[in-house]
Image (spheres, rainbow, N blue to C red):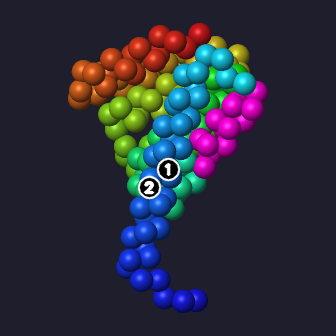
Amino acid sequence: MANVTQEEQDLQYTFHRKTAINLFNEVWDLMEKTDRTSEEDFQMIHKAHASRFHWGKIGEPVNFSRGEWQISRVYAVLRRAEPCLVHAKRNLEIVLEHDIKDFDLAFAYEALARAYSISGDAAAKEKYLNLAKEASAQINKDADRNVVLGDLETIE
């Protein structure tokens, strides 16, 4: 295997980081689009997974968590309970394993509450909704707390 220069490592890092960020943002644009086509639904899925893949190459656990959260949210938007739940659970595993707190912990619980809501498990939904509210009380920034609490209100 050939040696990789520092310059090549830096280029790879920059590529993965820029690609992960750009894809993450493109997924948000698609999620917020009210008249998405079926093809755009598939693009949204692929871009969310691709963003998480690129974070997996160069990111930190918080990036992995947020990538899993976004994938879960994409599947929630598409009302696909099983993959939504798989990625919500993976998100919480990462958060707990790496002791990630604040905003990310609350959103990990939010993702599970949303996934269980879509799957029709009302008891589990309530459990994680309550955990999300409890975690929200520990968020340092009011603006971040308000984002989480606002998102919790959108869970059916």
Q: Residue at x 41, y 28 (%)?
A: 106
Residue 46 left/right relative to 51: right
Within the image, what quadrant is residue 79 found in?
top right
Is disc 2 in contact with disc 1, using a CB cutoff of under 8 Å? yes
Residue on which disc 1 sits: 20
Task: For the C terminus, give its image quadrant.
Answer: top right
Report, in whole angstroms, how far the alpha carbon at label 2 lies from the one at label 1: 5 Å
Q: Residue 69's x, y, as percent?
A: 52, 36
**Observer able to see residue 63:** yes
Label 1 crowd bin: few (<14), some (14–19), many (20+), radius 10 Å: many
Tell me: residue 102, above or below residue 77: below
**Percent of width and height locating residue 25:** 48, 37
What residue range appears in magenta?
38-50
Overall secondary structure of the magenta section: helix
Does the magenta portion include 139?
no
Residue that numbered label 2 is attached to: 17
Quadrant containing the N terminus is bottom right
Horizontal and vertical percent for residue 154?
Answer: 52, 12
Residue type for callout 1: Ala
Q: Amino acid at mark 2?
A: Arg
Determine whether, in the image, residue 71 is placed left or right of residue 105: right
Inspect the magenta stretch and tell me whether residue 46 lies in it.
yes
